[in-house]
Image (cartoon, grey):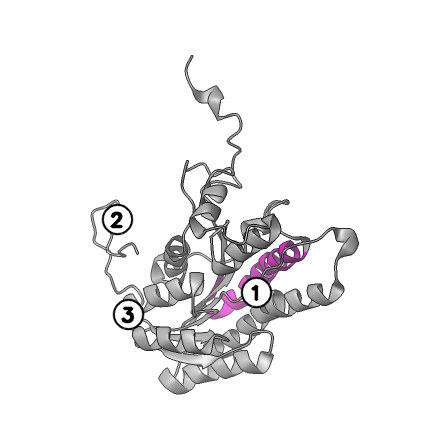
Amino acid sequence: MESSNHQSDGGQKLGTKRLMGKVAIVTGGARGIGGATATLMAENGAHVIVADVLDEVGASLAKSIGGRYIHCDVSKESDVEAAIQFALSWKGKLDIIFNNAGIIDNGRSIANLEMENVANMINVNVKGVVHGIKHAARAMISVGNGGSIICCSSSAAIMGGLASHTYTLTKAAILGLLRSTSCELGLYGIRVNCVSPHGIPSEMLVKAYRDHLGQADMTTEEVSNRISQNGSLLQGKCGSFEDVAQAVLFLASDESGFMTGHNLVIDGGYTSAAVQMRFIYQDP
């Protein structure tokens, strides 16, 4: 994991404790992007609550970073409310929430979508984020110190053809919610931002590749290679959990204090330009 002890352009050293004393909740925080983010936040001085349904993994991670764990199914509003109340009872405030929990599916033709699957994806990926923003806003407004709400969307929300119809639907909905809630909550000094990763080889994504291609022995490295060869402007590079965690850390910290309503895309330039014609930039 990259150190957060960087030099700014002006030569001023950024501290390694960029979230000192802040209280943060990470949903889906037991592993993957959530786990990397919870760890990085703790390394930067935050008191972190890991909220997940993976009790053993989540509790172990929380213990290792000096945080707390709570079982939380984000599709259930009462679970999310309980996680936020836990933060208030533990430290008396909530400064940051990263609405990261989500699920994916393997995708089907629009003509054959199973509506039960659509409803399940919406319950987790959309309602889960609504629950997080709703109850975090209540807590932050009551304390009166502002706060940072960060949601996790996807490059699939920006352009078609990157994920299933249902996953694309749910991640695009988050972008709309980001914009409307940032408008309202800005009145209270609460910033609402979003990160949109592209093709991070999580356990869920690797499994989806294996299932779709019928290659049960496909490795994480092989999935990463496929992603990196499929349009990244940074040749041979695939995004990592830590890349996303660093972006979330920035949005959680005071360094992004004048940013709200923003979707920070972490895609190696995939959604900005095509690489198929890159040869035209080479001198003859």
Residue 223 lies, in percent from the top left, at 48, 48
Q: Name the front one of labels 3 and 2.
A: 3
Residue 206 lies, in percent from the top left, at 51, 54
Near mark 2 (Cα within 10 A), the count class, few <14, some 14-19 or many ≥20, is few
- The answer to which quarter of the image holds residue 56 is bottom left
Earlier residue among tags 3 and 2: 2
**Mark 2 residue type:** Ser
Disc 1 on helix, strand or loop?
helix
- The answer to which quarter of the image holds residue 168 is bottom right
Res. 8 mark: 2
Residue 262 lies, in percent from the top left, at 50, 54
Instruction: Name the residue: 69% across, 65% down.
Output: 117
Residue pointed to by mark 1: 181
Question: Where's the N terminus, which quadrant?
Answer: bottom left
Q: Is residue 282 visible?
A: yes
Q: Name the front one of labels 3 and 1.
A: 3
- Answer left or right for 46 relative to 54: left
Q: CA distance from mark 3 to mark 1?
A: 27 Å
Instruction: Name the residue: 53% across, 28% down.
Output: 276
User: What's drawn in magenta, residue-wise?
Assistant: 166-192
Instruction: Name the residue: 21% across, 51% down.
Output: 12
Question: Where's the C terminus, which quadrant?
Answer: top left
Residue 238 lies, in percent from the top left, at 43, 45
**Any magenta on residue 191?**
yes
Disc 3 on helix, strand or loop?
loop
Residue pointed to by mark 3: 45
Look at the picture and state if 235 lies above or below 76: above
**Mark 1 residue type:** Thr
Near mark 3 (Cα within 10 A), the count class, few <14, some 14-19 or many ≥20, is some
**Any magenta on residue 169?**
yes
Q: Is residue 94 visible?
A: no
